[in-house]
Structure formats: structure tokens, C-alpha cells
Image (cartoon, rainbow, N blue to C red):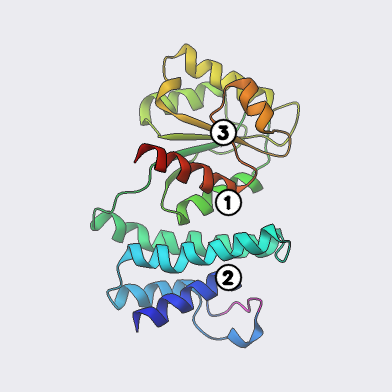
């Protein structure tokens, strides 16, 4: 029974069906339980939250990532799946806390000062939550001082900085310099992303990594995890 539920959960993530009211890509699934209903059912069947995440949610998003990379899926398709996973993680959060399941790490993310674009940041946030990271979204147009203060007070393991514009990406370097000035740069891994930035720019400003998208961020973070093991 549990294998059937987890397989259905994975498939509905791939289909981007948050609830039974959603059509998804395969119309034959209309009216059947979606990701939220299946997540609740899995919990009622005493399936461990870790299994729900790894075998259902994350496994489904891995397929979505492959389809997105091959251009079989487009941004709206990926967003539908990511939003379904994010909603499921909200259901699972209290169960994870109650069972003392450790997250993979604490990740803070922000769109830097002067930039109000948030679609990419929001996708990364949802994907990382589904991958088992504790994510704090600091918002858009976030002042450098606020980012530094958050790092000083909350001690995240990772900091994600997003910028879409060439005029605002320079603020990423300013954030890193401010972290150094406040003696907290060594406490946190800094990842950058956005249309304007690149691997070369990440090296130029002293960031730890450039992430092309949310799936790339997961690969980078899992690489850090492996290095720490």
C-alpha cells in the first residue's frame, strides 16, 4: 500500500497536480487525489515523512528537472510541480519537527537591494524546501545591512543572493564585502543566481557558487553536503 501511495505521489508531482481539482498534464487523472490529498493519506497510513519526501516529492521533482532541462517542460509546468511540493512540505513540517528529523541545513535567500524580481527566487525556495532544506525567504529589494544582520543573528548555513539586472548584480559583491567587514563571511556559504550573473562573476566577487536555476542550487548544495560528510 505504501509503495502505491508514494508512486502516486511522485506521479502527481510530475503532473503538477496540487489537489484533486487540478487537471495536470494527463487528463485521465482529473478527479483523483493530488499531491496534498496523497501526502495526507500517506501520513494517515503512518508512512514516514522522510519517505514521503525522498520517494514521493523529491523523486517527482527530479523527473520534472529532467523534463525542464530537455525542454519537454516549460516554466509554468515546473512552477505547478514546485508549488505542489511546497504546499506538501507545509503539511509535513510539523511532523518533521515532531520526529526530530534534521534538515539538510538552513538556507536564507534574498533578491538584493534595488531588484524586485522574485520568480526565480520563489522557485528556488520551493525546490529547496522539497529537497529537505530549511529556507527563510528574506524577500525582494533587501538592503545589504538587513542580510548581514540576518546572518549575524540567525547563523544560516547558506545564503542565496538573486539579481536579474546588470545594474543590481553589483550589490551581490557589496553583500559579500559587508559579510567580511562584519567577520561573518566564513560562517556561511554564499550562492548567487539570476539572469545577469555567471560562474565567472561568482569567482570575481568571491561567492562560493553560481547556480543556473533551482535544480542547479540543489546539486551545488548536495555537493557541499558530500564534502562535509
Percent across and percent down for residue 202 are: 62, 28
For this orientation, the residue located farthest to the top is 181
- Looking at the image, tell me whether mark 1 or mark 2 is earlier in sequence order: 2
Q: Which residue is mark 3?
A: 209
Residue under the point 73% across and 61% down: 71
Q: Main secondary structure of the magenta part?
A: loop
Q: Which image quarter: residue 172? A: top right
**Image quadrant occupied by the C terminus:** top left
Q: Is residue 171 left or right of residue 9?
A: right
- Mark 1 to mark 2: distance in Å? 15 Å
- Mark 2 to mark 3: distance in Å? 28 Å
- Looking at the image, tell me whether mark 2 or mark 3 is earlier in sequence order: 2
Dot 1 and dot 2 residues touching (CB under 8 Å): no
- Looking at the image, tell me whether mark 3 or mark 1 is earlier in sequence order: 3
- Mark 3 to mark 1: distance in Å? 13 Å
**Image quadrant occupied by the N terminus:** bottom left
Q: Which residue is mark 1?
A: 215
Percent across and percent down for residue 100 are: 24, 53
Residue under the point 70% across and 27% down: 168
Work out whether 97 lies above or below 105. Answer: below
Residue 112 colored in magenta in the image: no
Percent across and percent down for residue 70 are: 71, 61
Work out whether 97 lies above or below 222. Answer: below
State the SS at label 1: helix
Q: Residues within 10 Å of mark 2 (few under 14, many from 20)?
A: many
Q: Which residue is mark 2?
A: 14
State the SS at label 2: helix
Q: Residues within 10 Å of mark 3 (few under 14, many from 20)?
A: many
Residue under the point 56% across and 60% down: 82
Range of residues picked out in magenta? 21-25
For this orientation, the residue located farthest to the right is 166
Amino acid at each position: 500500500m505504501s509503495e502505491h501511495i508514494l508512486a502516486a505521489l511522485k506521479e502527481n508531482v510530475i503532473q503538477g497536480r496540487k489537489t484533486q481539482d487540478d487537471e495536470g498534464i494527463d487528463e485521465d487523472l482529473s478527479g483523483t487525489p493530488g499531491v496534498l490529498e496523497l501526502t495526507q493519506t500517506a501520513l494517515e497510513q503512518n508512512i514516514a515523512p522522510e519517505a514521503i519526501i525522498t520517494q514521493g516529492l523529491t523523486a517527482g521533482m527530479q523527473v520534472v528537472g529532467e523534463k525542464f532541462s530537455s525542454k519537454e517542460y516549460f516554466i509554468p509546468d515546473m512552477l505547478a510541480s514546485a508549488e505542489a511540493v511546497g504546499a506538501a512540505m507545509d503539511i509535513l513540517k510539523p511532523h518533521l519537527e515532531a520526529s526530530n528529523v534534521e534538515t539538510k541545513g538552513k538556507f536564507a535567500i534574498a533578491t538584493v537591494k534595488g531588484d524586485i524580481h522574485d520568480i526565480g527566487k520563489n522557485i528556488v525556495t520551493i525546490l529547496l524546501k522539497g529537497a529537505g532544506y530549511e529556507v527563510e525567504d528574506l524577500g525582494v529589494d533587501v538592503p545589504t545591512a538587513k542580510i548581514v544582520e540576518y546572518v549575524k543573528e540567525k547563523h544560516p548555513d547558506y545564503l542565496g543572493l538573486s539579481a536579474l539586472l546588470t545594474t543590481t548584480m553589483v550589490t551581490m559583491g557589496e553583500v559579500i564585502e559587508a559579510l567580511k567587514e562584519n567577520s561573518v563571511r566564513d560562517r556561511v556559504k554564499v550562492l548567487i543566481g539570476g539572469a545577469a550573473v555567471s560562474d565567472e562573476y561568482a569567482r570575481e566577487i568571491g561567492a562560493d557558487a553560481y547556480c543556473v536555476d533551482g535544480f542547479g542550487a540543489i546539486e551545488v548544495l548536495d555537493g557541499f553536503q558530500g564534502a562535509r560528510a
